[in-house]
Amino acid sequence: MKDKYIIIVGCGRLGAHVAKMFTRSRNSLVMIDKDATAFSRLSEEYSGFTIEADAVEQDTLLRAKIDQADVLVATTDDDNTNIMIAQVAREIHHVPEVMLRIYDPSRAKIYEGTGITTICTTLLAAEAFGQALSSQEGVTLP
Amino acid sequence: MNQHILVVDDEKNIRMTLTQCLNDEEYTVDLAVNGEDALIQLSQADYDLVLLDIKMPGLDGMEVLKRIRDQGIQVSVIMMTAYGTVERAVEAMKLGAIDFISKPFTPSEIRKLVQSVLQRHVLKETELNHFEEYLEFAKKCLLEQHYEKAEEILIKSIALNVEAPEPHNLLGVLAEYYRDIPRAQKHYRAALALDPTYRPADQNLERTVQWKYTQAGMNLGDEGDSDER
Amino acid sequence: MNIFMVGGGHQTHFLAKSMISKGHDLTLIEENSEICARLARDHQALVIQGDGTRPYLLQDAGITRCDLLLALTSKDPDNLVICQLTSKVYGVPKSLALVNDPANRLTFQKLGVQTVVSTVEMITDLIEQRLFLDDISNLSPIEEGKVSLMEIELKVDDRVVGNTVQEASFPAQSNIGCVLRGQEAIIPGGATRLEVGDRLIIICLPKYQSEVLKTIRGRLT
């Protein structure tokens, strides 16, 4: 993944971590968070821009030059916010790759078929627990 | 030929992202963490280009630019602004800087700008072909203070691309330089009519509305205010 | 009609009262337990405490019977999610969302929300139409400001006082729908004479409002 223009919304633990991963290759990152103190979670090696603003406001995304984005990642703590931002990115600004994190998987039906990638932390964690358990007991779960 | 670039920005993540974008076969990148640091480095080495952040604590970008020129250093300068910061386009032009880029910017945006600024100096009036070359040559004229020639070339460039807002914006800056504010505003509005999202013209228009022009000279207004947009 | 209202805080009380008095079946979903308790006490409605953006909650509340949903929370993303869930996933035929940021109105419409109300825009429109500066109340913006409905009270020095409607020569692009005189409501004809204290209910296109005012008052302000 080289030279992609990536916008991340939400500099919580997950957002900051995602930024760290993407920083490694030659990408241009923009991190958006309502609260500037969140940026302290970014690693020392973070190279990119930061914008302190509410991404639910249309102006913020325009300011981040969303029309030129290759990737948008929505990692705020609020499912509904992530769902809204992801759809705005995908349906209105046609960002090629849009990913979001949600806790409640049942809400994913809203944007089914739009090509938005869902990362459901609840399901992933449950699977991981399941795998850990099965490997302990020597049982393979279906 | 390896071009030497100095990046001046107080934010570490900006310095790093620019290093990543530009550090390759074509360019060598040096970093300065603030205005004073930049002046020291510029006195110690020759640079082909300076990327200069406007809003920095201590010496801000415009002050650094002024001091560089006072010292007779001719290097090309690209001014970097944060979103919402009003570009002091005329002031910068008088100090020999005509290129602005607002943060955040994509890698291709900055690379394209760097390339066109560095290649500008070889352009000759007799060898101009398409719109971009005319535009770049006009900027070269503005930087060299050949204002009449710049205006002539800008008008020619409009004929080659009637949809582009940039020539109109530059004509506005030129009009402002000549203290013809109504005419400047007319040009900025023309730019915006062609492209309502063209920020430089938007900011220039707003700036001309905010600041008061007195008979004695340009009253640049309260610098603090312009950053609080 | 079976109406669901999600959020809305204290205003829910008055909306609920109005809807129930019109004979609708109401389900109210609200996160704040105190507001829920009050609503349950004051209204003949199904009151559910919880997050209306959770599909399971909407299902339990019987969303599939819903005819109209109003998303009135203070958070735009929540209102969007509620409307999209109810129309896309549960097939509710009509939905309305409140937007706090007027710039989101277009966004919501592009994302499929049928009706979007922006209170900020409504107020700024009223101010822009300068109707607060006059003794007029704008009754309701219809069709997103395409039609203007005004109520104007006639004062002693207004030009049209004493004239018949025909003599008053209102602009052709306007219509006096009704004259409220004391306790009476009169549907006026050309011969109806206008008196001080009459409240005229006028329908016109927004751009002719000034002309209507000028006709009535004899001046613009």
Image: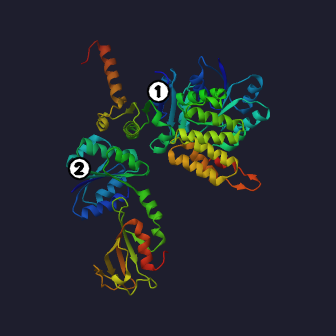
- In this rendering, would A68 be left or right of C116? right
Q: At which x and y percent is residue B109?
A: 54, 31
Q: Element under label 2?
A: loop
Q: At which x and y percent is residue B194?
A: 50, 45
- Image quadrant assignment for residue B49: top right
Please tell me which residue lies in front, A47 or B111: B111
Q: Are marks 2 and 1 in contact (CB under 8 Å)?
A: no
Which amino acid type is marked by label 1? Answer: Val
Tell me the quadrant of the picture where the N terminus of chain B can be found: top right
Which amino acid type is marked by label 2? Answer: Pro
What is the chain letter for disc 2? C
Vertical position of residue A43 compared to residue B53: above or below = above
Vertical position of residue C159 compared to residue C98: above or below = below
Q: Element under label 1?
A: helix
Instruction: Give me the residue at 46% from left, 27% from top.
Output: A18
Instruction: Give me the residue at 53% from left, 35% from top.
Output: A38
Q: Residue furthest front?
A: B126
- Image quadrant assignment for residue B96: top right
Q: Assess disc 1: are there few (<14), some (14-19) or many (≥20) residues with their C-alpha within 10 Å of its C-alpha.
A: some
Q: At which x and y percent is residue B169?
A: 59, 44
Please tell me which residue lies in front, A124 or B143: B143
Instruction: Give me the residue at 41% from left, 57% from top.
Output: C119
Q: Which mark is residue A18?
A: 1
Instruction: Give me the residue at 57% from left, 30% from top.
Output: B129
Q: Is residue B86 visible?
A: no
Say which residue label 2 marks.
C93
Q: Residue furthest left?
A: C65
